[in-house]
Amino acid sequence: MDFNFTSEQQLLQESVERFIQDEYDFDTRRKLAGSDDGFSRDNWAKFAELGWLGVSFSEDDGGFGGGPVDTMIVMEAFGKGLVTEPYLPTVVLAGGLVSRHGSDAQKADIIPRIVEGELMMAFAFAEPHGRFNLADLHTTATADGGGYVISGHKAVVYGAACAGKIIVSARTGGDVRDSDGVSLFIVDGDADGLSRRDYRTVDGLRASEVTLDNVRVGADAVLGPVGGALPLIEEAIDYGTVAVCAEAVGAMKVLHDATHEYLKTRQQFGQPIGKFQVLQHRMVDMFINYEEAKSMALMATLRVDDEPAVRAQAVSAAKVQIGKSGRFVGQESVQLHGGMGMTDELNVGSYFKRLTMIEVLFGNTDYHLNKYAAA
Amino acid sequence: MDLAFTAEERAFQEDVRSFIRDNLPDDIRHKVETGKTVEKDDYVRWQRILNGRGWLVPNWPTEYGGPGWTAAQKYIFATELGASPSPRLIPFGTSMVGPVIYTFGNAEQKAHYLPRILSSEDWWCQGYSEPGAGSDLASLKTRAVRDGDHYVVNGSKTWTTLAQYADMMFCLVRTDSEVKPQQGISFILIDMNSPGIDVRPIVTIDGGREINTVFLDDVRVPAENLIGEEGKGWTYAKFLLGHERMNIAGVPTSKRKIADIKDIARAEADGAGGALMDDMTFRRKLAETEIKLQALEYAELRMLAAESAGKAPGAEASLLKIRGTEVQQAITELTMEAVGYYANPYVAESFQAGWNEDPIGPAYAGPAAPVYFNWRKSSIYGGSNEIQRNIIAKMVLGL
């Protein structure tokens, strides 16, 4: 057993954490979140330059040959800064799908451009009425000539506004919710017939409703097996889930430390409020929740490359823990900060909001608890 | 023992119900139902409608304009009002400073302020908390120094709800720093248009702009605005906090919101071909909250019965505050869970009444997350739930 990082991983961690500390303070993040793009293209170029956009891709594809642990390191540090740049949709979700299942031509076209910071992507997997069921698809792709015509509505697609390419799940056969008949397509962000309604999100990011109205793609747009892509989608969502678990751990760490500090400094009744045993125990429970979350995020990271059944079970377990811990740590941080915790000026609320939305993302606590119990 | 209301009480209930149905303006009802921001004018219009019927201040003695209701009637009225899609009644004038004025104020103060509360001519805000005095309210530092026939007030008050609308503030100030903290506090009424007052909004985590910090810089307040005696402010403040016990639990509103969740859960898909309402995991959580609410309702009814029998209610009211806010918060969590991914889109303009674009996702989803974040306040304000538990430990259990 070895929980130590390699020396390369240590360097990666130091470099990302230093960036967050030196260049991504809360005011900077607030300005970025409020800007037109909602993030900084200069930062994105810097991520490329520092190699963070390529850590998880194989060297053959133009990456740096890292794995889930490297992604965890980046995402945990990003969670501490509440980074708004579209790393999750571009690198983890879409990039991951292409690197694992793309054709040689697709990989050669896409991965180097992601690594260089030239291409951002999004993954449109959810639909308005599917809740968390990845197979509940009303979007259809009909074979036409040599290619396909895609029509449908994809819901709450993170990072779609800046995406040069969007990976879209659609039905090439079967009934709504059938396991078979699901396919993936790589669609240009500016394709004819594709329209977006962009908006801000509660957690300070950007997402879109993406409508496809007879969007034509060639046969070379198909990613993975026609009609057999559901396992690929489940796998991609599991990788995404592990990544947001790490992000949540970073966010919880900030809330834990801020609340700990507040208990030691805020004076009421002539003493620091941290002297009150009731609040001490609440802080201890925050500490325990954080430790549990970190442990489970790590466990899932180390299992995500395993066979599908093992992977899915580990991911659901971690997501349940992160959902519960994130809610507890978020709510208690606000409560223990009192009125200050309710203010937009303090950073606490922004971390709480991101943790709240991470709980929903890729299936909420109930969904994963049921999935785990049923397996 | 009998759970039912009498025939007279049922007739009264029907009266209240039909009055609200016939008199609550449609535009205001629509705002409340769709989670839009309720504006000052909406609150005032609704208060004036209730006042026109003589129903604005159920708890006031008849000589000052109260309707002279029994405890059961007050309960029925509060229940019907809470169950209806009407704006909440702003408590600062009617439930807070009003009773202090008619109990401790002098004849001139009663004659001047009470009618203006009833007519909604004055909008009141509460000047209690300070940046350094939250749970430990008695440590407040805002000072009032006597200067001829005025007090000169310096300091700052915070978390002041809707101070941006206020004409008047009832304020706890320190008039004596030589005595025990509680004994040096006085209760004065400050005109919000006085020179030296600066109201600055505090944006909350849900994006709302309800609360403020009020800075007071050499504000001259006529000495006649002092309520009762100098140094007795803490006693009046405690009277005020203990006064409004009804509604503290928010049972009727919570019932209405649980009904709303059921509507949402019937409309939302469960991802398995049915509705979310078919999902036993969700249903069980909803049922647990409903049962918790029922326990709260009957606790409240038992306290009401004791009060009707002439027993002065005590610190048990803290129980209503703790459980009431916990249920409210659980309801906001369930609402947010019910809407799934559509909790996340945030369109700030969509909460204004004039916004008429299509919502992103179902219309009920838009307010779900902001309301959840906003209601985290309820376990903090009005004496945090930790302070309420201290009160029960000390006053009820003698620990």
Image: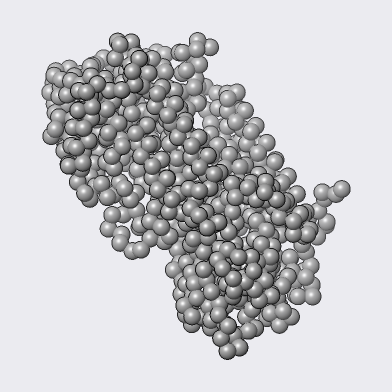
Instruction: From this view, report whether residue B299 is shown above or below residue A260.
Output: above
Q: Residue at x 50, y 26 (%)?
A: B386
The answer to whether one can see residue B76 in this image is yes
Residue at the bottom extreme of this rendering: A145
The answer to whether one can see residue B135 in this image is no
Quarter of the image for the N terminus of chain B: give it.
Answer: top left
Q: Is residue B172 left or right of residue B59?
A: right
Quarter of the image for residue A46 reads bottom right
Between B200 and A290, the residue placed more toward the observer is A290
Q: Residue at x 72, y 72 (%)?
A: A101
Between A42 and B44, the residue placed more toward the observer is B44
Residue B374 image offset from top left, x and y in percent: 42, 43
Residue B62 image offset from top left, x and y in percent: 15, 20
Q: Is residue B358 left or right of residue B326?
A: left
Residue at the right extreme of this rendering: A1
Q: Residue at x 43, y 60 (%)?
A: B361
Q: Residue at x 57, y 72 (%)?
A: A170
Instruction: From this view, report whether residue A61 is shown above or below residue B25.
Output: below
